[in-house]
Amino acid sequence: MNPQIARHSNAWIGFTYASFAASAAMIALGVVFAPIDVWMKGYFAMGALMLVQSAITVTKTLRDVHESGKLMNRIEDAKTERLLMDIERTKDERPA
């Protein structure tokens, strides 16, 4: 019962940071240079920020649900293993 933890490479982590920064910069430049009124730019900027915030929240929630399921499975495995050990111990203690 030794779960292996998958680790991301530094290249992948760097790529995700770079792609997030590039997409945020492109949205920001698009909003700033759009030929629209200031109030519309503000609306689009707030929408973009809320989209990023909600994407982070959804990602964290899905990760937490997944991790919770793994913990529950480990707890269930430990309970089952303990029950089997108790049964085996009782079987060994019975007189032949």
Image (cartoon, rainbow, N blue to C red):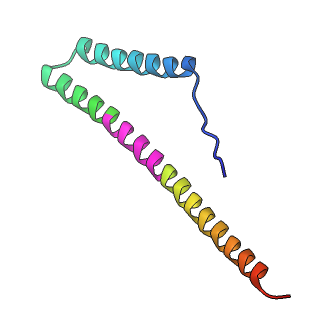
Q: Where on the picture, by quarter, is residue 29?
A: top left
Where residue 7 appears, as percent x and y from the top left, is 58, 31
Lateral position of residue 39 relative to residue 22, left or right: left
Q: Dominant secondary structure of the magenta stretch?
A: helix
Q: How many marks?
A: 0
State whether residue 71 is above or below residue 59.
Answer: below
Q: Residue, x 44% and y 20% (percent of image)?
A: 17
State whether residue 96 is above or below residue 45.
Answer: below
Where residue 77 appears, as percent x and y from the top left, is 63, 63
Q: Residue, x 56% and y 17% (percent of image)?
A: 11
Q: Residue, x 72% and y 76% (percent of image)?
A: 89
State whether residue 84 is above or below residue 14.
Answer: below
Specify whether residue 63 is painted magenta: yes
State whether residue 91 is above or below residue 11.
Answer: below
Lateral position of residue 43 relative to residue 57, left or right: left
- Give the camera-side residue of 88 and 38: 88
Q: Residue, x 59% and y 68% (percent of image)?
A: 79
- Give the camera-side residue of 93 and 69: 93
Where residue 69 appears, as percent x and y from the top left, is 53, 56
Give the magenta range: 53-65
Q: Where on the picture, by quarter, is residue 44?
A: top left
Lateral position of residue 72 relative to residue 29, left or right: right
- The quadrant of the rendering that contains the C terminus is bottom right
Specify whether residue 60 is painted magenta: yes
Residue at the farthest bottom position: 95
Residue at the farthest right position: 96
- Give the camera-side residue of 52 and 29: 52
Lateral position of residue 90 relative to residue 60, left or right: right
